[in-house]
Amino acid sequence: MAKARKFPHTYVIIFYLILFAAVLTWIIPGGRFERTIVEVGGTEREVIADDSFTYTESQPQTWQVFSAFFDGFVDKADIIVFILMIGGAFWIMNHSKAIDVGILSFLGRARRLENNRTIRKLGVDNIIITLIVLLFSVFGATFGMSEETIAFVIIFVPLAISMGYDSITGLYVCYVAASLGFAGALLNPFTIGIAQGLSNLPLFSGIEYRFFCWVVINIVGIAYILRYMHKIKKDPTKSPVYEDDAYWRSRQQDSVEKVEFNTPKSAWISWIFLSGVFTYCAFALTTTKLTVGNSSVIWPVFPVIAVAFIISGYFMLRKSVHFFILNLLTFTILMLIVGVMGYGWYVMEIATLFLALGIFSGISMNYSPNTITKLFLEGVKDIMGAALVVGLAGGIIIILNNGQIIDTLLHNISGAMADMGKIATVGTMYLMQTAINVFIPSGSAKAALTMPIMSQFSDLIGLSRQATVMAFQFGDGFTNMITPTSGVLIGALGVAKIPFNKWVKWVTPLMIILVILGFLLLIPTVTMELNGF
C-alpha cells in the first residue's frame, strides 16, 4: 500500500516561500523610489516622492535565505516576545482552573436563557457568537485591533471547544472578527486615517458608505461562521482540526468538579495591593482622553475602574479565588482597551499588562515564587513554536527588501493601469493592494508607500481619491487572514494550535467570497454619487 503523502510542516512551507522570494530577486530588477517625510495627523510618515523611481543594481539573494530566520526574528522581536509573555502568563492563570470555572459558569447561565422561547428559536450559541464577532469587529474598525487578538485566542478557543465547536471557531470570533472590522475600517487611524491624510482628504470622510460596507461585510462573515458552526455541532469530526484539537480537549479532561473552591489569604493581599494601585491611578489620572478615530471624549476612567475593581473584587473573593482571577482578567481587558484608546499602548505595554495578570493570578492562588516561575516557563515552552514561526515568516519580507524588488513591483503595476476604465482601474488598484499586502502586511506602512502614487494617479484618470482609499482599505484588510507574511496571523494560528495548511484550506472559500464582495462594494464608488466621494 502506497504511503499517504504528508502535507509539509508550516515551517517548511514558509521556508519554501523564502526560497521563492529569493528566486524573484534574480528575475526582477532592483529599483528604488526616493522617500520624503511628511506629517500626517501629527505623526511623521515616510512617503514616496513624485516621479522618483529609478532602477538600481540588482541585489540577488543567495545565502541570505539561511540568515533570513535570524533577521526575521530580530525584525519581529516585539511580536515574538509578546507571544512568549502572553503564553507564560496565561499558563499560570490556566493552572488555577479559573478559566475552566468561568467557562462552565458562563455556559450554565447561557443554557438557562434557552427557557426564553425567542432566544431558544434564535439559538443561544448563535447569539453569543454573533455578539462576540460584532464586538471584535468594532475594535478592528475603530482602533485597528490586530496584534491584541493573540491574547484573546487563548480565551476563546477553550470556550469554543467547551461549546461543542472547534479551535477554528475560537480563532474566528476574535482574530477573523477583528480582521473583518479592519477591512471595514470605519475610524481606523492606522489605515483610513493615514491613507486619507496622505491623499489630502478630510479625515474619516465618506464614513456613511464605509459604514454600509462594514455592515455588509459583517453580515457575510457572521453568516459564514454560523453555517460552519451548525455543521460542526452536528458532527464534530467534520472539523478539519478535529485531531489537532485533541490538545485542547485533553486540557479539559480534568473535571472542574475536582476544583477546591476557597480563598487564600494571599488573594486578599493581592486585592488590597491592587486596590491601592487603582486608587493611586484614580487620583493621579482623574480624567483620560479616549480617542476613537477622529473623535475623542474625556472621561474619569480610572476613578470608575478603581471603584468597580474594589467592589467587584471583594464579592468575587467571597465566592472563590477562581472568580477573583476571572475578575482580574476582566479588568486586564478593560485596561487594555483604555491603554490603546487613551494612551497609545502597543505590544510592549499589553504584554506587560498580561504578565502582571499572570503573576497576580499565581500570588492569589498562593503559589510560591518558584512555582510561578516554573509555570511561566512551561507556558513559554508550550507556545515557543508559535513565536519561532513568526520570526521565520518575517524572513520573507527581509529577502524582498534586501533584494530591492518591492519598489520595482509597485512601479510596474501602477504603470500598467494607465489605459483602463474607471471600474477596471479601481478593481486593478484593489487587486494590486491585495497582492502588495502579501509583501507588506502592515497597513500603515502600505498606506505610506502606495497612497502618494495611487491618489495622484487617480486624479489623472478622473477617479475619486476616496475610491482609491477604499481600494486600499479592502486590499489591506481581507488578505491579512491568509498571508503567511503576517506575523499576527502566524502567531494567532500558533497559539490556537491550528496548522497553517489546514487554515488556508478552510479560509480560502471565505477569502474568495470577501474578495469578490470587496470588488462589488467598490463599483458604487465610481458609478454613484456618494457623500464624501
Image (cartoon, rainbow, N blue to C red):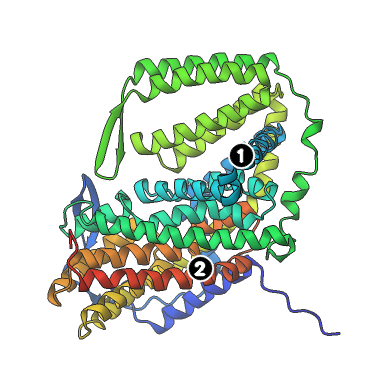
Report if residue 486 is visible in the image: no
Q: Which residue is mark 2?
A: 510
338 left or right, relative to 425? right
In the rendered image, residue 79, in percent from the top left (x then y), is placed at 50, 49
Q: Quadrant of residue 322?
A: top right
> Considering the numbered disc 2 on the image, is that residue within a helix, a strand or a loop?
helix
In percent of the image, x 21 and y 78: which residue is there? 422
Three-letter code for the amino acid on which mark 2 is drawn? Leu
* Quarter location, residue 499: bottom right
> Which mark's residue is nearer the viewer, 1 or 2?
1
Name the spot of residue 442 as percent of width and height, x first: 38, 58
Amino acid type shown at disc 1: Leu
Residue extending farthest right:
1
Q: Which residue occupies the extreme front position in the image? A: 117
Q: Is residue 247 left or right of residue 336?
A: right
Image x and y of residue 524, in percent: 25, 70
The number of numbered discs placed on residues in the rendered structure image is: 2
User: In terms of depth relative to the viewer, which is nearer, 16 or 230?
Assistant: 230
Q: Quadrant of the N terminus?
A: bottom right
Q: Give the quarter of the figure containing the C terminus.
A: bottom left
Please give the residue where the numbered disc 1 appears in the rendered image: 113
At x 34%, y 73%, the residue is 520
**In this image, 315 relative to 445: left or right?**
right
Pointer 2 local density, CA inside 10 Å: few below 14, some 14–19, many at least 20: some
Residue at position x 13%, y 71% from top? 459
Can the viewer see residue 156 in this picture? yes
Which numbered circle lies on residue 230? none
Which image quadrant is residue 344 in? top left
Residue 193 vertical position relative to residue 216 in the rendered view, above or below: above
SS at mark 1 in the image: helix
Residue 479 or 36: which is nearer the viewer?
A: 479
Between the C-alphas of marks 1 and 2, the distance is 31 Å
